[in-house]
Every structure is written in C-alpha cells, then in structure tokens.
Amino acid sequence: TSSTLSFSDSACIIMNGGTFQSSDASEMTGANDKNVFKAAVSGHKWGGLRFNETNVKIYNSKFQDISSPSVNYALSCVNCSLADIRYNIFTSSSDTAGGVNINYVYSFGSPGYDAYIMYNTFTMSSSHANAVQVQGYAGLTAGTYVTDNIFTSNGAAGGIFLSTITGGV
C-alpha cells in the first residue's frame, strides 16, 4: 500500500540521528505503489526532507512540489553514514529544485559513508539544479554508487555532480 504526505507551504521534515525509512527496498512496479511527498495545496511548494547524521532508506517514493528560494533539493543529507535511495521518482516543478543532495563534511571514522542512488527517475523540466549532487570535504573517502537512473531535462539541469568523492561508481 502507499501513502500521501502533504506539506503546508515551505514546511519540511528535519531529522538528526536515527533511521528514516520510507517503504521497503523491493521494486514495486504499479503507479499507485509509491509513497507521495507533495505540497498540500495546488501551486504551493514544500521544503523537502533534510537529514543530519541519519541512516536514510527511501524506496518507492515520489517527490514533487519542492520549494526553491535559491537552490533546494527533495532530499538533503549531511554526514549520513547510509543514504540508500532506490526506485523513486523526483519531479522538479521549479527552476532551482533538484533531486538528491548529499554532503560529507567531516570523517567520523569507521564504518564510513555509503550512498546508493539506484533505479530512480529524475524529471528536471526547466530546473538549473543538479538532479544528483554528492560532495565530500576534509579528504574523506565515501562509497558512492549512482547507477541505473533515468534523467530527463529540457537541457538546463545537470545530471550528476560529484565533487571530491573518492571511490565513486
């Protein structure tokens, strides 16, 4: 079964620590099998999901109506040891909204960082933001796998941006 989460204008979820999971990791093929994250009122936008030092497991979900006062992403992760993002749909409805933004600011040692961004669809329309952006700082090593995704745009958006990532595939 699927759920719809509707957010008021500019609202977002911010989570520090713990584990956030949406749906399960097996591929669901039906259009109604996706959890939907969207604005509550037509024409409004919401702020996305923001995680700090959280294990993030997001599967079979659909993200739309993301606000973009400057550049904003449906999913933003900072120092998340696990970001497992599979079988999702990201639809940008503004010129500065992106899909997934992952930042590794410092290294806290073992077990390290792992990001899996696989089997997703990114429809960027007229956005100038990157669909997927992964950046590392402080000379750390982060296992980053971005594979089997579908990217569409009218030509303005970047697909994948990796900066100072060691061990990216």
Image (spheres, helix red, strand yellow):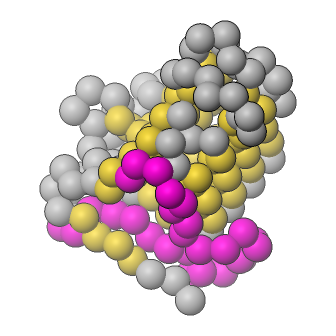
Residue at point 34% right, 29% down?
71
The magenta span reads 15-41
- Say which quarter of the image contains residue 134: top right
In x, y percent, where is residue 97?
A: 38, 37
Outermost residue on the front side: it is: 109
Question: Quick one: which residue is furthest to the bottom in this view?
Answer: 1
- Is 28 left, or right, of 101 in this rendering? right
- 21 left or right of 66 in image: right
Q: Is the N terminus in the top left, top right, bottom left or bottom right quadrant?
A: bottom right
Which residue is rendered at x = 54% and y = 34% of the image? Answer: 79
Q: From where the camera sits, is residue 150 visible?
A: no
20 lies left or right of 120: left
In the rendered image, the vertical position of residue 14 relative to residue 76, given as above or below: below
Q: Is residue 54 visible?
A: yes
The correct choice, above or below, for 145 with respect to 37 in the image is above
Q: Pinpoint residue 101: horizontal percent, then vertical percent.
A: 51, 35
